[in-house]
Amino acid sequence: MSAMGAGPDHLFNLRNNFYLGAYQTAINNSEIANLSPENAVERDCLVFRSYIALGSYQLVISEIDESAATPLQAVKLLAMYLSTPQNKESTISSLKEWLADSTIGNNDTLRLIAGIIFMHEEDYNETLKHTHAGGTMDLYALNVQIFIKMHRAEYAEKQLRVMQQIDEDHTLTQLASAWLNLAVGGSKIQEAYLIFEDFSEKYPMTCLILNGKAVCCMQMGNFDEAETLLLEALNKDAKDPETLANLVVCSLHVGKSSSRYLSQLKLSHPEHILVKRVSSAEDNFERAVQLVA
């Protein structure tokens, strides 16, 4: 992060597009003049992470070579981890080697990518080993997500307070606040909805913003409004996993068939938690049927 008051932030729009899920916009508008070498590396990381978010793993792997800076090497590791699940052991052992290297192990982007990979592995203790010290808004925001996944809202709230002290209006601070409000539930859902509503007034609509609003609507019992928002998100990206997963849930509540969305999710994102849950439920059902038979 650039120091507060240290002149104009040339990467502000690029970061914002990335945080809000406008990945193609981030890529298209990434030619920025007069960047310092450090900012140029951060710019490239954001562009390559946008490609990863769009599923273009091979492009990232082929474009980042051995001579690239450590943050870019870390992003390449993430692309390798996501593109070939069967090789993830070797990717994780490379990651652990780098983290143990005293010259680069403390690099913020490497710690962030380590956090993302170990969070995918659902190894939260290992994740926090590398992220808990924070230091950047991205790391604090990731910590908020990790603590929410661990059902430790009180720790997530501490991280959010640090973010609010650094920059209350930062997009990640607002997002982290919305995630925490959704996790806490109750009267906080309305506050989360207002954050996503604010984003949708300020910035172009993305799947992330539409899903955020839709999840709030579902939590408040407004399934018809949620369905409208999710179908709009599906128009933007027919393969977005969160949109498909939320449509599965929403369809069940409005009494419509969810099988098409579930099939699509299974095809495009076989590792998605909803797919895993459904197949384990189907396996349990099969076993139960066989026992009765």
Image (tube, rainbow, N blue to C red):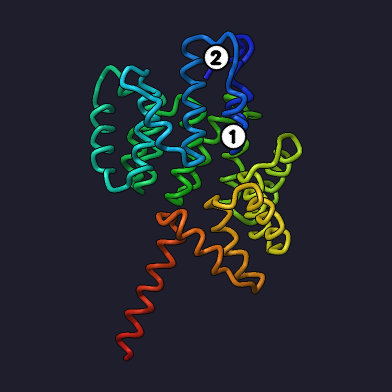
Whole-percent x and y of residue 19?
A: 57, 34
Who's the residue at 72% across and 41% down the image? 200
Whole-percent x and y of residue 266?
A: 45, 60
Whole-percent x and y of residue 271?
A: 40, 54
In the depicted view, which residue is nearer to us: 188 or 11?
11
State which quadrant residue 293 falls in.
bottom left
Mark 1: secondary structure: helix
Establish if 63 lies above or below 119: above
Whole-percent x and y of residue 38?
A: 47, 13
Q: CA distance from mark 2 to mark 1?
A: 28 Å
> Can residue 220 be seen at all in this image of the molecule?
yes
**Which amino acid, mark 2?**
Ala
Q: Which residue is mark 2?
A: 3
Q: Is residue 171 left or right of residue 288?
A: right
Who's the residue at 28% across and 32% down the image? 95
**Which amino acid, mark 1?**
Gln
Mark 1 surroundings within 10 Å by alpha-carbon count, few (fewer than 14), some (14 through 19), many (20 or more): some
